[in-house]
Amino acid sequence: MIIGGDLTKVNQMLSDAQKADFYSGRLPSEPLRSLSELAHIRLTTKQDLREHSPYGFLAVPRHKVAVYHESFGTTGKPVSIWLTEEDLMDTAAEINTCGVELSPADTVLIRYPYAISQIAHTFHLAARLRGACIIPASSRSTISPFPRVVRIMQSLEVTILAALPLQAILLAKTAELMGVSPTRGFPHLRAICSAGEPLTPQRRQLIQELWEVPVYDNYGMTELGAAALDCAYGRLHPLLDDFVFELLNEQGTASMDLGKIGYLVVSTLKRRATPLVRYWTGDRARLVLEPCPCGAQYRLEVRGRQEDCLEIAGSIFDPWDLEKMISDIPGKQLWVVGPLEPMGLHFIVESQILQGKKNSGKIIMAHAGEYQLPIQVSLVPPGTLYSSQALLDAGEVGKPRYIYSREELDAKLYEKNLRL
Ligand SMILES: [Zn+2]
């Protein structure tokens, strides 16, 4: 299925994209006669972007470019994304469709990384356009370690925390270690704006419980900008005026029906400097027809990147599946998972109920009912996956990663003397 845009906008985008070397001669020479013909155009992959960076996707003269960003994959060469001044303003406007409704009354602490990637800068611009006061704290920086951010949030009466979900969790944990209650120590905080990693329903709930404020999600990436935003009702809606969305099968050869899980392919309709036609995002997703009180018709469920999924015995498990399997574990907070030989899943789960206990690693064996796979859960005390000392020290902590290899799972348990 294809949703978003209209034929006029799509044809304009195709004509503009041809100005980039990569798309020159690759796109149809005649305008499309229907939106469904878009499906005949070859996909653009991250590998294409990598191979043709930095200039191959640039579709405007250099003097029209306002800013340059890169996105990094797990390996290899970075991807170059250029933006004009208008691209920047459009991306900020997309972010401001969010139900959080930033205003001059807000003090917004931005904990997204400012170095090279885009989200911190466009969120910053979006908040400025709404008249909010911004604290550009950045993340994974030795200048703004977790305790300093906690102190700033308190003393400057921060109303909005903008952070990756894992960072929001680790900040709450740091506050607790400092003797500050996340729920009572920040009376001015009214919302958390999340971006940068998939927000499973359980993770959203955990953050909302830790801080007792609503979470607003933003789905996007440096390559696209903000492509879907949470409305005031906390539902993630695709931005149909600015992007065309398709869901394909794993091979990218056939379209998936509404409501089915597939792989998200997005075409940009407004990006002038680096337009992308049928970009294979690598994200597993589901589009649902679900009219919302806010007026939107569709809801987007982003279930995680391909590299955040585990394939066991021919089945693919994404973060939503994985988190659901361990949702009943009491006091569950942070977790990682890897393969269990010969074909199962091994989770390490930090549980609040083991708070203050040392070396109390406990193993639970279970069967993931609907998947018919053995799962092993090593229940460990908080502080096993992200050490309390590291949170209180300066340093680079908190890059999201949930999938471990078998050896890494063992090493993590061994390091904490929890090997059973
Ligand atoms: Zn809505």
Image (tube, grey):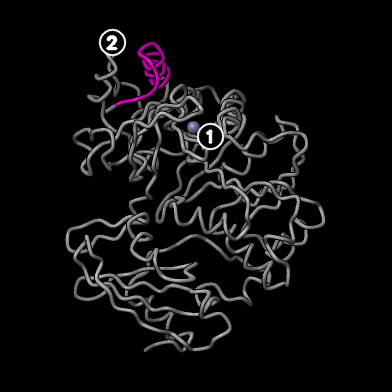
Mark 2 or 1, closer to the camera = 1
Viewer-side residue, 162 vs 103: 103
Q: Which residue is mark 2?
A: 30
Viewer-side residue, 15 vs 411: 411
- Residue at 67% x, 70% y is 176
243 to 310, vertically: above or below:
above
Please, what is the three-letter code of the amino acid marked with disc 1? Cys
Is the C-beta separation of discs 2 and 1 under 8 Å? Answer: no
- Residue at 20% x, 42% y is 251
Residue 10 part of the magenta-drawn span: yes
Kindly state the secondary structure of the residue where label 2 is placed.
loop
Q: Which residue is mark 1?
A: 231
Viewer-side residue, 122 vs 241: 241
Q: Quadrant of residue 335?
A: bottom left
Precedes in sequence: disc 2 or disc 1:
2
202 to 23, vertically: above or below:
below
Q: Position of residue 318 (x, y in %)?
A: 33, 55
* Magenta highlight range: 2-18
Please, what is the three-letter code of the amino acid marked with disc 2? Glu
Crowding at mark 2 (Cα within 10 Å: few <14, some 14-19, many 20+): few
406 to 223, vertically: above or below:
below
Label 2 – label 1 distance at C-alpha: 38 Å
Crowding at mark 1 (Cα within 10 Å: few <14, some 14-19, many 20+): many
Kindly state the secondary structure of the residue where label 1 is placed.
loop
Q: Position of residue 11 (x, y in %)?
A: 36, 14
Does ligand 1 reach within 8 Å of label 1's beta carbon?
yes
